[in-house]
Amino acid sequence: MPDSPVLIITGASSGIGAAAARRAVEFDYRVVLAARSHEKLEGLAEELGGPEHALAVRCDVTSWDDQQALVATALERFGRLDAFFANAGFGAKRGFLEESVEHWKAMIDTNVLGAALSIRACLPHFRDQNSGHLLLTSSVAGRRWVIGSLYSCTKHAVTAMGESLRQEVAETEIKVTVIEPGAVDTPFFDSRPANALEPDDIARAVLFALTQPPHVDVNEILVRPTAQSN
Ligand code: NJP
């Protein structure tokens, strides 16, 4: 697979990001796995076939230096970059009197600034080659208001960011997809959610968007478990 397409995934150490990496490799992508837990990434890279197929890169998405280094490493090691799945994120208890202010700041930095820095890091390369695909993980909570949820506010920002970016690059061949999961059974939750999707259910949606022909830009995918009402 010397010249197969290359996909960077942030938040690849578990859950949706790890599942997307597994599916992408099945579709002959080479993947660059990014998160803070380097050991988990190394384990997944090994599982996916080692350095020819998957590269583990420690990256805190709130760090501009880390994000620039991530894109540079992908280009240096694989020689091309075709897609970037900005997926890293986490939540907070509902209620505007819950959690610490520090937790709120970290969540906003990760979910909102982190996604924006991912765009900023790969967009110059995508513009230079006049192609590329940016996918952002928002949420069903980024499509409807959730009572007492600052997390929902961060995901509304991500949904807006996706559409805002789509308009900015509309005259180019660059694609933008916002992924909006309902409840998915991942470490995102402290205790396992009932009737939730599996991470692979979202991974298949990601690959659906990624594998469309050049003239098709899937802009938004909302996937709920069948039994989720809101
Ligand atoms: O959760 P989890 P999901 N820099 O905890 C990484 C959204 N979502 O797969 O750094 C870099 O398994 C963290 O890695 P690590 C959700 O908001 C979910 O469910 O090693 N990476 C891990 O790989 C999020 O945007 C549900 O700790 C950072 C990953 O993020 C996305 O789906 C529903 C980081 C989180 O994986 C993936 O979450 C929904 C940082 N600063 C939206 N901070 C759901 N599960 O129900 C965290 O609507 N990570």
Image: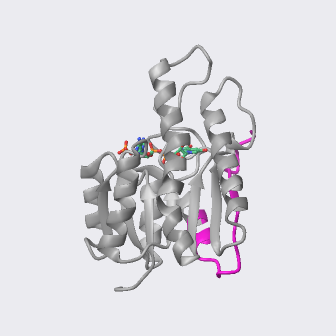
Residue 48 appears in the figure? no
Residue 26 quadrant: bottom left
Relative vertical location of residue 113 with respect to residue 33 in this rendering, above or below: above
Q: Is residue 138 visible?
A: yes
Number of on-image labels: 0
Taking the magenta stretch, the answer to whether it contains residue 67 is: no
The image position of residue 165, as x and y in percent, is 66, 57
Q: Residue lying furthest top in this view?
A: 97
Residue shown at the point (53%, 28%) measured from the top left: 92
Q: Residue furthest bottom?
A: 2
Residue at point 51% right, 52% down? 87
Residue situated in front as seen by the camera: 221 or 190: 221
Residue 5 in the figure: left or right of residue 150: left
Q: Is residue 133 left or right of residue 171?
A: left
217 vs 148, nearest the viewer: 217
Q: Nearer the viewer, residue 199 or 113?
A: 113
Question: Where is residue 3 drawn, in percent x and y?
Answer: 39, 85
Magenta region, residue range: 205-230
Residue 213 painted magenta: yes
- Up/down of 96 relative to 89, above or below: above
The chief SS type of the magenta part is loop
Instruction: Locate residue 34, reporting x and y percent.
Output: 37, 55
Q: Is residue 119 above or below residue 111?
A: below
Residue drawn where x is 40% and y is 50% of the image? 14
